[in-house]
Image (cartoon, rainbow, N blue to C red):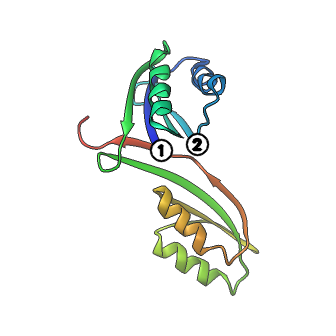
């Protein structure tokens, strides 16, 4: 099985997200990650969809998405020719003696401390999935209270 990241330009109309997600559920395909946001043109939104499957399944998914009326363009975001990022917010239990260690790890990853409470820190980090996974791995020795990830979003490099 391989993973593919699809950047799908759609008309910004009500129900378009439901129609795209419904296509996946009707056919029994799983979505690993889905992000949606308005583009520089208010009439359009861009969906970044991450799916895994065999080559035949991934090809079928792309063909089915392309058939939807609201879909204007589909681009496969490939390593090297695109930039993909994800945002993570993580709340870590931290007393006064643990804070310097957590802050040191955050500094190495160029993460930001966005909230400090008496018994916790909230850290914000943006990067590729491997970077975020490594960051989480290094903080496993501390009590991670909550984690939220945005899912992948991306664009092709250059003028494309």
- In the picture, the quarter occupied by the C terminus is top left
Residue at 65% x, 53% y is 148
Residue 21 at x, y percent in the picture: 61, 27
The relative height of residue 114 versus residue 41 in the rendered view (above or below) is below
Does residue 22 appear left or right of residue 117 in this picture? left
Q: Earlier in the sequence, mark 2 or mark 1?
A: 1
Which numbered circle lies on residue 77?
A: none
Q: Nearer the viewer, residue 20 or 36?
A: 20
Can you tell which quarter of the image residue 25 is in? top right
Let me know if residue 117 appears in the view.
no
Residue positioned 62% across, 24% down in the render: 27
Element under disc 1: strand
Can you name the residue that lies furthest to the top here?
69
Q: Position of residue 31 (x, y in %)?
A: 59, 37
Extreme left residue here?
A: 159
Mark 2 closeness class: few <14, some 14–19, many ≥20 residues within 10 Å:
some
Q: Say if 17 sits above or below 67 in the image.
A: below
Classify residue 29 by image quadrant: top right
Whole-angstrom CA distance, mark 2 to mark 1, is 9 Å
Tell me what residue is drawn at x 60 percent, y 83 percent: 100
User: Where does residue 72 sit, x and y in percent of width and height?
Assistant: 40, 19
Name the residue carrying label 1: 3
Decide: few, some or many residues near mark 1? Use Cα within 10 Å; few <14, some 14-19, many ≥20. Answer: few
Q: Which mark is residue 32?
A: 2
Where residue 9 appears, as percent x and y from the top left, is: 43, 26
Find out whether the residues at labels 2 and 1 contact each other: C-beta distance under 8 Å: yes
Q: Say what secondary structure mark 2 lies in.
A: loop
């Amino acid at each position: 099985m391989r993973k593919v990241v699809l950047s799908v330009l759609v008309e910004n109309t009500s129900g378009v997200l439901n129609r795209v997600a419904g296509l996946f559920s009707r056919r029994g395909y799983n979505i690993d990650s889905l992000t949606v946001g308005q583009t520089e043109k208010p009439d359009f939104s861009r969906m970044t969809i991450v799916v895994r499957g065999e080559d035949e399944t991934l090809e079928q998914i792309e063909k089915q998405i392309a058939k939807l009326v609201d879909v204007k363009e589909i681009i496969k975001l490939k390593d090297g020719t695109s930039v993909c990022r994800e945002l993570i917010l993580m709340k870590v239990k931290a007393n006064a003696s643990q804070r310097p260690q957590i802050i040191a790890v955050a500094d190495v990853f160029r993460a930001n401390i966005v909230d400090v409470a008496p018994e916790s820190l909230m850290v914000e980090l943006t990067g590729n999935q491997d970077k975020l996974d490594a960051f989480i791995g290094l903080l496993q020795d501390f009590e991670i209270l909550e984690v939220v990830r945005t899912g992948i979003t991306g664009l092709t490099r250059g003028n494309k």
